[in-house]
Image (cartoon, helix red, strand yellow):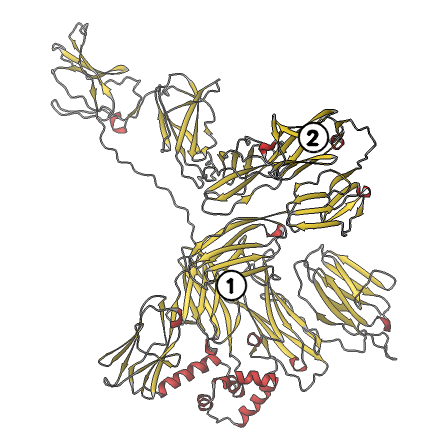
Amino acid sequence: SSVVFEAETEKADAKVRWQCNSKDIASGNNYLILAEGNKHSLTIQTVTKEDASVYAVIAGGSKVKFELKVISKPADAPAAKPEEPSMKPEQASDPQGGAALQGETPTPKDTPPAEDTRQALTGLFTEKPQSGEVTVGENITFVAKVNAESLLKKPTIRWFKGKWMDLATKCGKHLQLKETYDRSSKVYTFEMQISAAKANFAGGYRCEVSSKDKFDSCNFELTVHGESNGNDDSGELDFSALLKKRAVQVHSEPDVDVWSILSKAPPSAFEKIAFQYGITDLRGMLKRLKKMKKDEKKSEAFLKKLDPAYQVSKGQKMKLAVEVADENVEVKWLKNGQEIQKSGRYIFESVGNMRYLTINHCSLSDDAAYTCVVGEEKCTTELFVKEPPVMIVKNLDDQMVMKGERVELECEVSEEGANVKWEKDGVELTRDESFKYRFKKDGCKHVLIINEATKEDCGHYKVKTNGGESVAELLVQEKELEVYQSIADLTVKAKDQAVFKCEVSDENVRGTWYKNGVEVKPDPRINISHIGRIHKLTIDEVKPEDEGDYTFVPDGYAFNLSAKLNFIEVKIDFVPRQDPPKIHLDCVGRTAESTIVVVAGNKLRLDVPITGDPAPTVIWTKREKVISEGDGRVRVETTTGHCIFTIEGAERQDEGIYSVVVRNPAGEDTADINVKVVDVPDPPQAPKILSVGEDSCVVQWEPPQFDGGQPITGYVVERKKLKSYRWMRLNFEPFPETTYEAKRMIEGVPYEMRVYAVNSIGMSRHSPASQPFVPVAPTSEPIGLCVEDISDSSISLKWRAPERIGAAELQGYGIEYRREGTDEWIPASQGLTERTSATIRDLNTGDKLQFRVRAFNMAGPSAPATLAQPVTIREIMQRPKIWLPRALRQTIIKKVGDVVNIVIPFQVLWTSVLSYLKHNCNEKFSKALLVILVKEWYTVHDHYRRTHCVVSDLIMGNEYIFRVFSTNLVGLSPEPCTTKDSVYIQKTGILYKAPNYKEHDFSEPPKFTHPLVNRSVIAGYSTTLSCAVRGIPKPKVTWYKNKMDISNEAKYRMLSKQGVLTLEIRKPCPFDGGVYTCKAVNDCGEDVVECKLEVRSQISKEEKKDANI
């Protein structure tokens, strides 16, 4: 027959390999491998006995093994049935894709089909755990998946064996429970891993999942093949025997008083007795026992005992009080079982029946258990000393190192032994990362050590305490070897010494010397030395065969340094006795005038061969000053056949032309030698900061006054924080320009800059530091620029503040305008305005102007906000409108002498003329006419008979002039009478009513972004439970243990910082184990998260000794 194995991966493009006996298999005569999307299959055609083996499928980091068993076909059966493969998962699937395997084989007609333990996907499960088989000693994993897309909170899952045994309390060597969450698919994956399975692990299991009012469960079976050794421990899951034992004893002894047995038994035997007598509610049992013990015993010596626990801050005073029955009785105070002696810190008081113990200036050593003893009775409490917040005294410094170097980030805190947390780019650093990071404590100093820095270590490192934090930047550069001094060509004569010398930047770099491509080996005449950064090759008593090309090759670098050794053989020929002197300058190219270059600080030695008979006299001069023989720094020596000129530690003033004159009775000879001393350049001038940005600045400097005799090849720039002492190099290759843009700075932090000059000789001293500066960026442009009002000579503009202000404060706004067709922007006012509106006056009527507004801060102006199109300076003309009410559209009848008051609403500008006319039929009386001039004259009263009047409805803030005409039947008078002075209508106070804006509702219900995690701890060691919540308004947080509020219990300490909630449990005991719940509530809703805490008992010394034996 044939058999098909199928596997399914999470990703469709995952690469899958199939193996048989740990060897890869491919499609061939007997194997057929297919892949369709995320489904993969292996088909074995014509199965034979040889195909029975162990197979495996591998996808990414996930590997699943399975076994194929082949049985012989019975004589009466029409077809053979290969056995179902037993699956042995070795590793959980990883993000690249896991595989789930399934075998499909034909079933013989005479064999009943195996029971299908797979269940339909109903309720909350998207994938239910399947029944499985495992061999004794091997591992198996059961997987359940829940889709949380429709759930309001994280689902809670529980694993059971049988009907009641909760496997969460059995996690350990043989059982592990894991859970993961895929944010893209919103699917929770829960895994139960059984390691080193034993025969008694077989049986029925159940998986339950719940989320508020939703619930789902499924059953599955585990079959274990093989038998385990009877001497082996049965593991954490061995409880089947207890179930049988409990069932027998419950029926045989129904009348046993379980509570009396529990009250006399030690706490370590409570669980065993509960299993034996069928008590499943362990929490209820413990509460009842605790209440029973309280009711039994009542103190006769104490009227009021100490509370179970107290809490006090470090350095504060604590007062413990008890009330005794007998006011004359003496009491003793114990600390951790030792009697406390009276001292300046411990004060005992007795007032009536009250007894007090006062502890002054509490320290961490006072965190202990205190007991008050009266005769044979005693009461005990526990004092918890709260530490003050730990402050960072010395901040971290930015560092720049080379690749492979050791990095130490050091800070100093206010308390010795304080706990700190290190982070890199927001991710916490721990010791679990293959020992890459080391943490060192030395009193108040804390150091983060990175032994060999790599490019991946670049980033921002942060150290946190409960009272502050500090950030520093680490930059790692590739190490490049710099040559400070190269080897130079040498010309020596026989039996002289030749020294090749070079200096590189790294003193740890070694190298090899070669002569004509052959490695030079040290011998008694050839010496190779390496001291610090200097490498030397010394050849004593030079011979003709030593002439050649010498090369120094640094180990690990792809370059070399070369120089040539020239050998001079002095030949003495027979000459007549009166031979005139001769200077032989073969070493410098046979010219009379030569230039010798020497590096400042090095030794210059010139051996000038001379001839002449008799032996000539040698005179060295510099600028007509004779240099005599001696032992000074610049000295000359004369020996047979040559004269020697030596400069020890050449300096800049040694530069110049040296003349050598040789004389004898036969004549004289002269030669000039130009000596040039080159040195590192002088330091540049103090740099100037041209501009600053959000995280950068542009720095400029002047070249050094003296370049050292060699052209400047570039500059090296360094920076440091103003309050730091560590300078960080910004470039390792010399920068050729005198303007440099420094980047990767922190906005708002003051910095200083300095510069080094570099030539072919080396690097100068650093320049003076620049003036301190702060990297800031200009603000963004103002928004919403528009025209608010306009007249013939003015315009009112308004705008809103920029969206981004930055670290620097906003200094104000600048307003400019330009005429259409020109490019010149004219400031509208002197200085800056802090308001977001402005009125520009004294403009010419009819001009077309373009306006713009810029925001200014320390960094300068922002980008301008400009009107979309030019604006014409002219008041907008509108026709006047009269809004006649309906009441005035009918005839109004009044008696003579009645007051007539007519109010007519209108819309008009002052350029229009408004007149109120009153017609009077009696024309024999003289009449007066009063008008107002506002660019034009307005008639106020017509046919007015009195010589005084009141003008109303004038506009506040305007200035008026009045004139009066007299009139009769003929008409108006030729000339009016005009007021001498104008009248200004004063403005009264105006109450500004701010507009109402609807505030955006940012409220949201609480939501736990990081859940609580189940923990297992050892009794006596303090532990913490942490989670993270968000919500607006800030939610109220309450902690529960087994659904009981623990907010007011002194044993627990609740902390909350920026949404991170922490519950600290001081020295837990086994009774502190249980389910802890954190509930967050605000006006928009609530959210709950919970976890299980298991507290294991400590192993006594006797048990350890027995285990070792």
- Neighbours of disc 2 within 10 Å: few (<14), some (14-19), many (20+): some
Position of the C terminus, as image quadrant, is: bottom right
Q: Secondary structure at mark 1?
A: loop
- Above or below, 842 against 611 in this view is above
- Above or below, 381 against 405 in this view is below
Amino acid type of disc 1? Pro
Query: Of tags 1 and 2, which is closer to the observer?
Result: 2
- Above or below, 935 against 357 in this view is above
Instruction: Give the residue at mark 2.
Output: 617
Residue 54 visible in rendering: yes
Q: Position of residue 656 (x, y in %)?
A: 62, 28
Res. 779 image quadrant: top left
Q: Position of residue 212 (x, y in %)?
A: 50, 66
Q: Residue at x 64, y 31 (%)?
A: 676
Q: Secondary structure at mark 2?
A: strand
Left or right of 68? Residue 915 is left
Instruction: Give the residue at mark 1.
Output: 1011
